[in-house]
Amino acid sequence: MKKIILLVLLQATWTTGFAQNLSFKFGIAFKRPDLDVRWNVPTNLLPSNVWVYHLLPRKFSPTVLSNLMALGPFTGKEVIRSNANEILFKKTDNLTTLWVSWRLGAIEYEPANPFGPTNLARDVPEEAQVPQLTTNFLKEIGIDVSEIEKKADGAPDFHVWSPLTMYPVNRVVITNIGFRAVNFRRSVDGATFVGNGAGGNCEIQFGEHGKPSKIRLSWRNLERQNAFPVAKPATLIKWIREGKAVQGMVRMDGEPINWKTAKSLTINQAELCYYAGDPFSPSDWLMPFAALWTSVDTGHGSVDVEIDCPVIDER
């Protein structure tokens, strides 16, 4: 099932024994103490315990950095920032950049677009070739492909897509595919990473001759910190009523939800997910939460919406 998961920011305040106070900063907050909430999934769908992970730097080797520099290609003269945590290259066109962050385990490569109606992209790989190209590239930069979220058959869950650019030239439309792209997410303990930090929403584009033409990924090292019990469905329902969960976006053609008058909330699917922040507000902790797929009886019809809820039972 294609996941449309709300980006949530969880902040952890650590005390003795690693108790934490989770706070959702994105999403639509709501509170309804008397809301009729129905749990319509197996009670054992979520695990009984969950780990909290410490996110650590990933040191890319000099060989990896050299290979990334060759994509530009970049030279030492194009370094505009370099310290113990990161290095940033930028060409004089101010469009082609390479940023490598050891602290965030991140690689971002953004080239200028050289293509146009008189300079079409050639020898771009076919979609069927992209999974193997992705696997080979990840191995080259030291990322274990087994950590990628998997399909039902156990294969890496690569989402491959292609853009189609059309150029009108002398009343004739010229079409060209400039690259083939792949999106993927990291997985830990069978749970999905959400957001752009530590392994959520990674993307690689492969252009002419199968060469990476754009890279955006973050893949920090993980260290298990401590295990915590997962709240029971009755506790999650209680937290939803108390306003500790947040509502995701409703479809554009859907009816806005008025929680004051909503008749009921039915939980049809529950999944454990992890969040580690995004490039603008990265966290040093990988925190679990429950992504709940629900149907809301508004009194005027039914609206499907995702509800994100804390999952650790501090008791």
Image: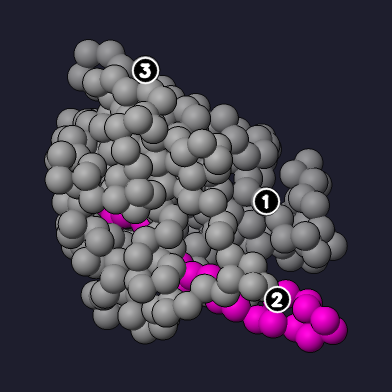
Give the residue at mark 3: 13
Residue 249: image tag: 1
Q: Residue at x 62, y 39 (%)?
A: 27
Q: Is residue 226 visible?
A: no
Dot 1 falls on a residue whose secondary structure is loop
Q: Who is closer to the viewer here, 155 or 257?
A: 155
Q: Position of residue 185 (x, y in %)?
A: 37, 57
Callout 2, which amino acid? Met
Task: Tell which circle, 2 or 1, labels the residue nearer the N-terminal end.
Answer: 2
Q: Earlier in the sequence, mark 1 or mark 3?
A: 3
Q: Tag 3: residue type?
A: Thr
Whether residue 292 is in magenta: the answer is no
| CA–CA distance in space, label 1 to label 3 | 28 Å
Residue range in magenta is 166-189
Q: Residue 254 occupies which quadrant of the picture?
A: bottom right
Residue 173: within the magenta? yes
The residue closer to the viewer here, 279 or 93, is 93
